[in-house]
Image: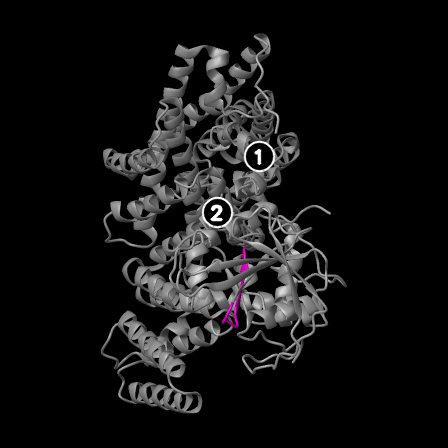
Amino acid sequence: MKFFKWKKEKDENSATGSKIASTNPVVDVTPRAEQQLYRGSKQLYSENIEENLQSLFQRLPDPNLVTEEFIIGSRSKTKVVIAYLQDVANTGIVAEIKNRLKGIKAEIIPDTSYIERNIQDSIWSPFPQVEIVSKVDLTLTALTQGRVAIFVDGCPNIIIAPTTLFDLLDTPEDAYRRWFVASSFFRIARFISFIIATLLPSFYIALTSFNPELIPSALTITLTAARENTPFPIYIEAFILMGIAEVVRMVMLRMPNTTGQSISIFAGVTLVLTGLVTNIISGPITIIVGLTIIASFTIPGFDLRSSIRIIQFFTMLMATIFGLFGLAVSVFYILIHLSTLKSFGIPYMSPLGPIELSGWGHTILRKTSVDMPQDETYKPKKK
Amino acid sequence: MTIKDNVQDKIDPRVIPLIFFLTIIEFKLFVMDRKVFLIAGRDSWLSALIGGVLVTLGTYFLLRLMKRFPQQNLFQYISQIWGRPIAFIISIGYFLFWGSYLTLLFNNTGEVNQIFFLEKTPILMPIFLLALGAVWLVAYGLVAIIRFIQIISPIFIISLLLSISLSLSQVEIHNFFPILANGITPVLKGAILYTGYFHGLEILLFLSPFLSDNTKIFKPALAGIAFLNFLAVVFTILAIGILGINNTNQMLWPGFAMLSLIEIPGFPAERFELFQTVPLLITAFVAISVILYLLSYGIIQVFKISQKKTVVYLIGLLTVLSTLLIPDFAWCMKLREVHIYAAIIFIYFLPLLTLLLSVLREKRGIIHEK
């Protein structure tokens, strides 16, 4: 493995930062099987910051690619490097990121999450306000959008800031798939899945508990028949089953790979089957919870997925107490939060709110373009 | 160098039609212009048509006034035009107008919720929940409200277009004849009253300082109001065409009754129209938020109060409590009808006088270099 040589220049504008430029970048990083990819680079970042920066310089040998180094952590003296394209990235956003990094007063930086929680706009928001990537190609596209990459020594994940909800719902396949119509179709399908994951159990509770007249008659009869011998009201069933699903998911995460999967599948199937056979839970709620869990796995980011699970319980609670009206109010609350949330000055729901049609081509849909479409979402410098 | 210097949070003038749709429609989708129906009868669609021209004309004058003072809102320039004492009285008038309208909106929402969703829940509970959301949104300012409108508008537009397209087949042409049976006078009276249903149009007078480009506002604003008028005419035609004028006049919710006749092949839900309460809730919430913004920030500006959030929360609480002063739903509907006349004064008459006076006294806004 070859390491590239560093040429450091003191940054005149920054008290702690220093500019780094590369010469002859060559690197070989062993790919790790972290996610299923059908197309696109499988090269992942390593835990060595210098290797990671080499990978970036190798893929993007642009003289406008600027990196600046910060030392953060009073004890760990962790090297943190930001990278951006100086002819694209918005000067105000870069300056704000540097200011927030300089403001971090931590003793140690064991992970990027320590940086993330110190630089994000709102600590109370359930929605992540930066994007975490572990692939080099994703960093490239982010930099060309005018975003900033933050590398932390010892971490294989890179922070990309700012971000929007639509970028968090993006997957590499959306950009790499040959046919733009298919990409747009799957993107819309993912948005629908996102809505299902957030609202389906609450919608079911509201309809069945408060407004059954809205359900088609034949379906109402089937639902009533299925619930004939179950002892609990629908909302209790929903909360129990959603709770069990969360426990099973936690087991999958905590246990070693093969053992964890076997135990969680066995436990999940046994519990559901026993519940159904003994009439403790009804069939329809099992379908609803199953569909919700499947839909939640279409959300690409781990942090966003975790947040949606919490939000599910909030909407369920509102629907349990206030029915369809409660569901509508909970959607209003979520949308109010999303419309007031910002990531480094960029509205979180951009390009839908505010509407910026130039950004729809590679966020909400994917337009047919041979080039990476340039949009105004991250307020890049005008070329 | 800060983010604010580089990333300006401004409103694109092209979203003005969306602002109009979600702010002005509120309960009119279900209640419709009842008073116009009572006066003009089966010729109400003609009143809507003529009234639409008047509303567009009114919008044009509001835009002219806005153009004279591109970087100020109404409360900032009326003192230059009217003089301080009169400007203060006008401001108080606007506060009473918005305050009473907000109370009526809250009361309507609570009543609607009780009728359609939660029969046994006390009326204050849903009002409080909506007020909480509105106060939260308003505390972030007008730009956040407009962003919310943009995000939620697809749900509203899809629901509305679905309702219209599914209702069209039910229209019976004979319900419109004979045309002008009672002469033109009721139609003209109805047209004037129709203009009073455009509560929320006055937001134009407060948008100026937040727009990214003040010079490009005429086209989207006029196109937006023209399309809104077109929708109003279509809904009036649908109500008369489907229900007939006698039924329309007798019903409390003609729009809702009209939607309840919708049948979707293969969709055997008994009360499909309940799904259409979604756009109603959306528009009601947006209207509440916008009016709460105008009222609270107006008070903040006129009385030079620095505790902005406190004022917003206090106004929210006071208007929620003031709904207790309305004895019942019949009173609420009656007060809404009276409020139409106040709307004509505050949305058209006063701004038009202000424009005339500013032209006569050659007053113009101060333009700051960017």
The residue identified by callout 2 is B148
Q: Amino acid at mark 2?
A: Phe
User: Which chain hosts label 1?
Assistant: B
User: Which chain hosts label 2?
Assistant: B
Rendered residue at 38%/63% (across/down): A311
Secondary element type, mark 2: helix
Residue B46 in the image, given as x and y percentages of width and height: 58, 32
Q: CA distance from mark 2 to mark 1?
A: 16 Å
Which span is picked out in magenta? A153-163
Relative to B103, is B357 above or below?
A: above
Q: Amino acid at mark 1?
A: Leu
- The answer to whether residue B233 is visible is no
- The answer to whether residue B187 is visible is yes
- Closest to the observer, A117 or A329: A117
Q: Quadrant of residue B291?
A: top left
- Which residue is at the far top? B361
Disc number lying in front (2 or 1): 1
- Secondary structure predominantly adopted by residues drawn in magenta: loop
Secondary element type, mark 1: loop
Residue B277 in the image, given as x and y percentages of width and height: 42, 52
Disc assigned to residue B201: none
Rendered residue at 24%/75% (across/down): A232
- Badge 1, how many Cα within 10 Å: few under 14, some, many 20+? many
Q: Earlier in the sequence, mark 2 or mark 1?
A: 2
Disc assigned to residue B211: 1
Residue B214 in the image, given as x and y percentages of width and height: 62, 30
Question: Is residue B120 toward the left or the right of residue B243 in the image?
Answer: left
- Closest to the observer, A219 or B126: B126
Q: Quadrant of residue B273?
A: bottom left
Rendered residue at 39%/52% (across/down): A333
**Count of number-bearing discs:** 2
- Badge 2, how many Cα within 10 Å: few under 14, some, many 20+? many
